[in-house]
Image (tube, rainbow, N blue to C red):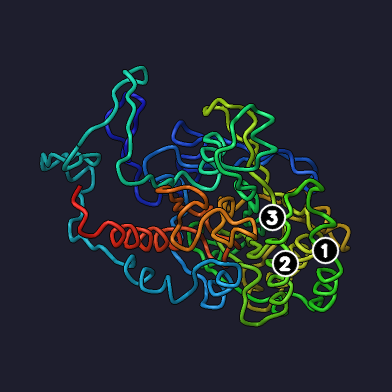
Amino acid sequence: MHSDQGEDFIYVPLLAGIGDGAIGTKYDWNLTYSPQPAANNRSIAIPLGKVVGGGSCLNKMTFDIAGEVDYDRWTEVGGVGWNDLLPYFKKVRSFIFTNFTPPEPEIAKEWDIQTDPTAHGYKGYYARRSNSSRSTVIATKEVVLAAGAIHSPQLLQLSGIGDPSLLEQLGINTVVSLPGVGANFQDHPLLRSVTSCELLGPYSTEGVSAYAFIGTSSFTNKTLQIVSSASSITPASYLPSDVDPSVLVGYEAQYEILTRDLASKNVPIMEFIFSGGAVYAILQHPFSRGSVVITSTDPFTPPSTNPGFLSHQTDLLLLSAAGKYARTIMKTPAFAPLSPVEIVPGPSVQTEADFEAWVRSTINTTFHPSGSTSMMKRRYGGVVDSDYRVYGVQKLRVVDAGTFPMIQAAHLQATVYAMAERASDIIKRTYRGDES
């Protein structure tokens, strides 16, 4: 990784996400979501990597992809599907093995072995000062915006591409009216249960994880009630009253898909991670939606970022059920030899009201911001087409997790890589033979 803050190249070690990694350091944008009304008005930190490579300096490096049905749902709203991405999932998969094992410090000292764990074979160019002279760079072919689901919509809005009503408030001339810029914002909400184990085993060992993606009926016997609750709610009844009609139409199309698949055995609704005595429940397809909006014309002022956690009742019901399921797992005979004792949420949490209150007080982010520059039809509030081109603008594309119309049942990293590889091929085909 590279730094523009005056020091030499910065190397972010492998498995940067162990512990807190770079979270909270100068390599993190150190942003927080706006207060979440449905989560006890808490402002939740959202770590974002402030280096070349973005979140790779602080994420957990979980590399997984969702199932075929998950990506094919994107095609229903104008996005790409499984067959479009599969070649690129295969392309980015690799295992780089090195047979060089650095010597232990004691051995290196005894044998006078000279090592530099931060060495780089090539240094390249980097900024030495923050007050260097400014230059204007003009793209001769096109611009590819890949600043992530928070900063990409911010830059578009600052450039006059977005909702005219927002831009007008800040005195920004509307270049292209695209109300979907910054809308449809999503994140995977996370719930954490903690158990103390008297005996050690693979489950209770820190750093050892097991992952499971399961459908609604696999973790609750209240599937029909949850589906009924979701079906009784209309998007217009809980989205902001001033939401643009095209954005509303787009979410209505998504809502139909989300409700349809809520009881499907082929669509994972919840991810469970077992690690270090904790059970993490992560809602994979939240109904809640938020937004990213600028509050200033100063590009260094962070936008107001709101994932809308738990703004839809269905998300609360699903996470409450997941919390109960985590407790059930720890009471199974398989865990009895570990003598587990529940610490969080604790024995005082028993009723549905108790669990819902616990969810509201502890819900957190999985560091998966997405959806704010969605690849959907323009009439659905989409921002880019299936070739990543921003509607109404020539030679401008967005390629990052903001283009995901509906967050998938997987961590984001592998899908971002595949989308980027696909965009690269599209761009190369566009200019093939053009040597200018």
Q: Amino acid at mark 3?
A: Val
The residue that disc 2 covers is: 255
155 above or below 327?
above
SS type, badge 1 = loop
41 above or below 91?
above
> Nearer the observer, disc 3 or disc 1?
3
> Residue 294, located in which quarter of the rendered image?
top right
Q: Are marks 1 and 2 in contact (CB under 8 Å)?
A: yes
Q: Amino acid at mark 2?
A: Tyr
Please give the label number shown on residue 234: 1
Q: Residues within 10 Å of mark 1 (few under 14, many from 20)?
A: few
Q: From the viewer's side, name the closer residue of 7 and 183.
A: 183
Among numbered discs 2 and 3, the one appearing first in the sequence: 3
Residue 400 appearing in the image = yes
Give the left or right position of residue 295, taking residue 81 as reference: right
SS type, badge 2 = helix
Please give the label number shown on residue 44: none
Q: Position of residue 269 (x, y in %)?
A: 66, 70
341 above or below 128?
below
Q: From the viewer's side, name the closer residue of 38 and 359.
A: 38
Q: Residues within 10 Å of mark 3 (few under 14, many from 20)?
A: many
Q: Amino acid at mark 1?
A: Thr
The residue that disc 3 covers is: 247
